[in-house]
């Protein structure tokens, strides 16, 4: 038992771990829940026979250590972009001609580099970019999805209200989109974790009891080991609710995936461990990372300051206000009244208080900074600009790292206005991103002075979108690469990107960037003189 230090059945594991400070060959005995985070070997933390999932050698949110087994082609150069030099080549260029231009440092790994797809980091929320994920998976699974943990609407809001902790709704939503669909059991698990309870409170509670007791038809197709693993954390979540009799939990429209995620987070006392477990249960590809922009076990509240000085507290109140009513969040772009003034900035607030004196400055997730320093492309996804994208940009270290990279930095422009962006043009979106990354209107001692072109160097625009495309203003900011992409019409949100065309355009930008890099003189050979 981890609490009293005694060796319990199935709760401790003997293993060798030279990476954690023990001498090689020396047995280390640590709690298995911590072992999962410490040694990174994916040791089973449940009783034998209860955990059937093939755990990875390294948790999906931790960057593998460089070794003969894990070092990929991206380690061949310091830029982190070499993996695309053969994979994405200009049309008509033969593989032989491309490989002949590879730097000498890549000569030994050129074949491996050709097989490596591009790597991306995407700043997004949990809804708008979800429609692109399926198509993106066909091109590459080497994607770091960076998501905020400040959502306080819908099913997530009820969990945070009763149990506290960070919001898990956006993370759960992206994990499900990335989950495996290749087998009937994988589809059954996805259906179970993606299920929502009825809107009627009594019906929702009754259905929840059927699920948590293992009697619901949603368990059909889920094998016994999977069933016991998932149900164990649902039961743990339910027990945590019962331990708080003062707060009555409302199951209306509740997400089973959110409940499972919350149970795992509370059990491990770690958001990262909960993401790892969820990723293994839903069998997300090893290279696909779902990263909270802030790795925390605490509740976070998003605030915004308007240009007229008004302070609004809570992400849902900024984007889809409910006036204190418990109801399903309506994300229709025309369902909300306009803000009294445009948004100046977003920031984080403590769980108490409602003014600027309670502003807090959480640390960015170290893994996000690490991924930013080595991916081949950075994407600011479409969606709620100030409540989905900007919360990930205002943290210290994010702007500094992005500005230091010479890679495609692509803004996916919204096709329609929403409550947050009414009146903004394309250059207004760029300004909002620049101000967030520079932390322009926060603490002056923590602000940066980078130019817009240091953060955004390409914009993809959906054809027929509502956002004015002020090309001259974009050019004055140093942004000249603007590309229109085919679009489709969505009945709820209006014009959106056609997923296939969007991914083609995005990979095309990466290809062009790599071609330009290949055209640069090789510093290892340009000054070599041939001697007869």
Image (cartoon, rainbow, N blue to C red):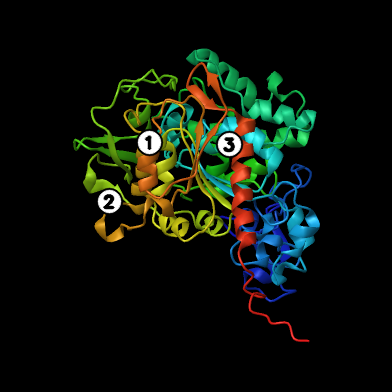
462 relative to 9, above or below? above
For marks 2 and 1, give the one nearer the viewer.
1
Does residue 114 appear left or right of residue 357 in this picture?
A: right
Residue 235 seen in render: no
**Secondary structure of the residue carrying numbered label 3:** helix
Tag 1: Cα neighbours inside 10 Å, few (<14), some, or many (≥20)? few
- For label 1, the residue is 470
- For label 3, the residue is 174
Q: Earlier in the sequence, mark 2 or mark 3?
A: 3
Q: Earlier in the sequence, mark 3 or mark 1?
A: 3
383 and 238: which one is in front? 383
- For label 2, the residue is 442
322 and 480: which one is in front? 480
x 47%, y 61%: residue: 404
Q: Position of residue 55 (x, y in %)?
A: 73, 49
How far is mark 3 from mark 1, CA to CA?
A: 33 Å
What is the number of the mark on residue 401?
none
């Amino acid at each position: 038992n981890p609490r009293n230090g005694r060796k319990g059945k199935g709760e401790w594991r003997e293993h060798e771990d030279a990476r954690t400070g023990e001498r090689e060959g020396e047995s280390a005995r640590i709690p298995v829940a911590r072992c999962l985070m410490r040694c990174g070997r994916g040791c089973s933390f449940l009783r034998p026979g209860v955990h059937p999932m093939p755990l990875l050698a390294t948790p999906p949110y931790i960057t593998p250590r460089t070794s003969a087994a894990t070092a990929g082609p991206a380690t061949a150069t310091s830029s982190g972009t070499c993996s695309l030099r053969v994979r994405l080549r200009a049309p008509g260029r033969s593989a032989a001609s491309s490989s002949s231009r590879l730097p000498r440092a890549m000569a030994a790994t050129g074949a491996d580099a050709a097989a490596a797809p591009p790597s991306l980091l995407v700043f997004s929320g949990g809804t708008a970019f979800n429609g692109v994920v399926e198509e993106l998976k066909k091109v590459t699974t080497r994607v770091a999805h960076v998501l905020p943990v400040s959502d306080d609407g819908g099913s997530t809001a009820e969990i945070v209200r009763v149990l506290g902790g960070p919001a898990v709704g956006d993370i759960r939503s992206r994990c499900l989109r990335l989950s495996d669909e290749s087998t009937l059991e994988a589809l059954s698990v996805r259906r179970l974790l993606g299920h929502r309870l009825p809107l009627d409170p009594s019906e929702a509670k009754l259905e929840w009891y059927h699920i948590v007791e293992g009697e619901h038809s949603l368990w059909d197709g889920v094998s016994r080991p999977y069933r016991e693993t998932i149900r164990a954390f649902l039961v743990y979540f339910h027990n945590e609710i019962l331990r708080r009799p003062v707060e009555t939990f409302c199951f209306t429209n509740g997400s089973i995936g959110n409940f499972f995620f919350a149970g795992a987070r509370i059990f491990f006392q770690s958001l990262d461990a909960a993401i790892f477990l969820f990723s293994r249960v839903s069998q997300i590809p090893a290279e696909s990372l779902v990263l909270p922009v802030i790795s925390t076990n605490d509740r976070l509240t998003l605030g915004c300051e308007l240009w007229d000085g008004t302070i609004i507290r809570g992400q849902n109140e900024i984007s889809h206000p409910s006036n204190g009513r418990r109801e399903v969040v309506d994300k229709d772009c025309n369902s909300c009244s306009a803000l009294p003034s445009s948004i100046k900035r977003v920031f984080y607030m403590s769980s108490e208080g409602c003014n600027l004196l309670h502003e807090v400055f959480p640390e960015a997730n170290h893994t996000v900074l690490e991924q930013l320093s080595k991916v081949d492309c950075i994407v600011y996804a479409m969606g709620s600009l100030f409540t989905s994208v900007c919360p990930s940009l205002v943290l210290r270290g994010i702007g500094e790292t992005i500005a230091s990279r010479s890679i495609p930095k692509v803004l996916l422009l919204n096709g329609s206005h929403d409550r947050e962006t009414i009146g903004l043009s394309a250059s207004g979106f760029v300004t909002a991103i620049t101000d967030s990354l520079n932390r322009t209107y926060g603490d002056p001692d923590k602000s940066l002075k980078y130019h817009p072109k240091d953060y955004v160097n390409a914009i993809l625009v959906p054809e027929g979108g509502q956002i004015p495309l002020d090309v001259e203003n974009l050019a004055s900011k140093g942004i000249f690469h603007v590309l229109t992409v085919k679009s489709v019409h969505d009945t709820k949100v209006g014009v959106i990107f056609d997923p296939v065309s969007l991914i083609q355009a995005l990979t095309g930008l990466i290809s062009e960037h790599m071609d330009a890099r290949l055209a640069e003189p090789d510093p290892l050979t340009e000054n070599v003189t041939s001697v007869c």
